[in-house]
Amino acid sequence: MKVLFCYPDILDFPGYPGEYYFGVGSMASVLKKNGFEVTMIHLVKKKGIDNFITDVKKFSPQLIAFSFTSNMLYYVQQCLKLLNNELPHIPVIAGGVHSTLNPQETIMLEGIDMVCVGEGEYPLLDLCNSYEHNTSRLDIENIWFKTNGKVIKNKLRPLLNLDTLPYPSREIFPNYTNLLHEQQRRIPFMASRGCPYSCTYCCNQALNNVYGTGGYVRFKSVDFFISEVKETLSKYTFAQSLIFHDDILPLKMDWFKEFAVKYKKEINLPYTCNLRPNLVKKEVVELLKYANCRAVLIGIESGNEYLRNKVLNRIITEEELGNAFSLLKNAGLKVTSFNMVGVPFETKDTILETIKMNARFGVDLVQSTIFFPYRGTKLFDLCSEQGLIDQNKVVTDYYTDTKLKNKNLKSYEVVAYKRGFNFLVPIYKKLFNCFGEDGTMPKCVDYMLKLKFILFIIYFFRDCFIYFKIRKI
């Protein structure tokens, strides 16, 4: 039996090659281990949809499996319309975070026959075995079936022991060695699934609620994970560094202590990982440094205490943030911050607070995004209740536009602040170095930032720079 995965991963950036996705890699590995033939369409450009049906026909699959996020729903619907017109006989199953949190909405999409809720490796294997043996099972746990106008909602199976899974397939991605991180000679890994925190904008709390067992957060055993890393590195010898995409790699100290020692001894390549500010302690930083961690990614999200803790539910004080950045930088680690603009109740002043906080903490690299209300999260519910979501607006990423109708900021202002965010942080760094945080010069810049024409100037020159850089390349 032939199974075709389809993973839309479209960002409107010139030259964006797409990223590796562990969910598809893991499911493909399980199917291949059990004798099924699998391939994948990795949609990274809008024009790729024009060739979608041609690519599907080349493989002649008996099952098509879509995995997608909420941002990609628009492109999935385009693909489904093409399938309905050209290949309506091929059954289609949907999975991924959006499908798990919104199964009812997903299964009602025209062209979707089944939805996988939760972890998909063994439900998908059971489904393929069912097709292979012509048993037409409709009782597979984790899978909802649409049949004869009705929806059959099967119960969830227990969560997986991650050590029981084969190592995720990377060759399933048709252009694996040319993906975003791989182009930089860096290979991504994940040692765990889930996050125990309850940020209102994030899918993790909603995923925890789906299972309701308190055991959604799991780690692979250190020995199993080290073996996975070593085997992968033996296949892809171009790697000069690693990046761990776990929500919080040093979440469990006993696990992380063992990992640090064995990683140092058996691998020792430089690596980058995610870390939560309140978990940055002296012992953690020492272990990171010992195990050859070179850079850490930390979420500030908002410099405004009310937005950060009451709206986003980060429950992180400014003191904790300051201590975290200080400890990491004093240890010689590079620090990247995650920031959002355009969150509910955002104002020009709160955006400025976030910019200034990044400058004050001396962040090495800033990543700024535009808040997107993901269906299934608490903040989506709040935005929906207050009528903040523009239902007629299609937004397919969190970089180029906002989905919210913010009472304090027009949509073009949110976009302009996002565009100017990374430009303004180093300016404030220099101003703080010269005048101090209470100097008169920063106040002048504060005032200028609020003038709309400054935003348009930033917008214009940034786009000019990108345009000429692309032409030069």
Image (cartoon, grey):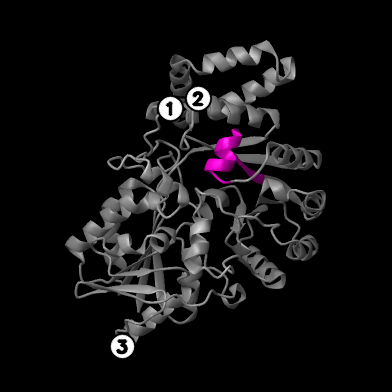
Tell me if mark 1 has few (under 14), some (14-19) or many (20+) residues whose alpha carbon lies within 10 angstroms of its own.
some
The answer to whether residue 469 shows anywhere in this view is no
Q: Nearer the viewer, residue 392 or 192?
A: 392
Task: Give left or right: position of 299 versus 62.
Answer: right
In percent of width and height, residue 346 lies at 49, 32
Q: Are marks 2 and 3 in contact (CB under 8 Å)?
A: no
Q: Earlier in the sequence, mark 1 or mark 3?
A: 3
How far is the residue under mark 1 from the one under mark 2?
A: 8 Å
Task: Give left or right: position of 97 versus 302.
Answer: left
- Of badges 1 and 2, nearer the viewer stands 1
- Of badges 1 and 3, nearer the viewer stands 1
Q: Are marks 1 and 3 in contact (CB under 8 Å)?
A: no
| Residue where numbered disc 3 is placed | 135
Rendered-image quadrant of the N terminus = bottom left
Question: Residue at horizontal 33%, vertical 46%?
Answer: 46
Task: Give left or right: position of 414 versus 49.
Answer: right
Q: Earlier in the sequence, mark 2 or mark 3?
A: 3
Which element is circle 3 on?
loop
Q: Are marks 1 and 2 in contact (CB under 8 Å)?
A: yes
Residue range corresponding to the magenta coloring: 297-313
Which element is circle 1 on?
loop
Task: Give left or right: position of 400 versus 293.
Answer: left
Q: Quadrant of residue 320?
A: top right
In percent of width and height, residue 356 lies at 63, 26
Q: What is the three-letter code of the residue carrying label 1?
A: Asn
The answer to whether residue 446 shows anywhere in this view is yes
Q: What is the three-letter code of the residue carrying label 2?
A: Lys
Q: What is the three-letter code of the residue carrying label 3?
A: Thr
Tell me if mark 2 has few (under 14), some (14-19) or many (20+) residues whose alpha carbon lies within 10 angstroms of its own.
some
Asked whether residue 298 is drawn in magenta, I would say yes
| Residue where numbered disc 1 is placed | 408
The label number, if any, that marks residue 348 in the structure image:
2
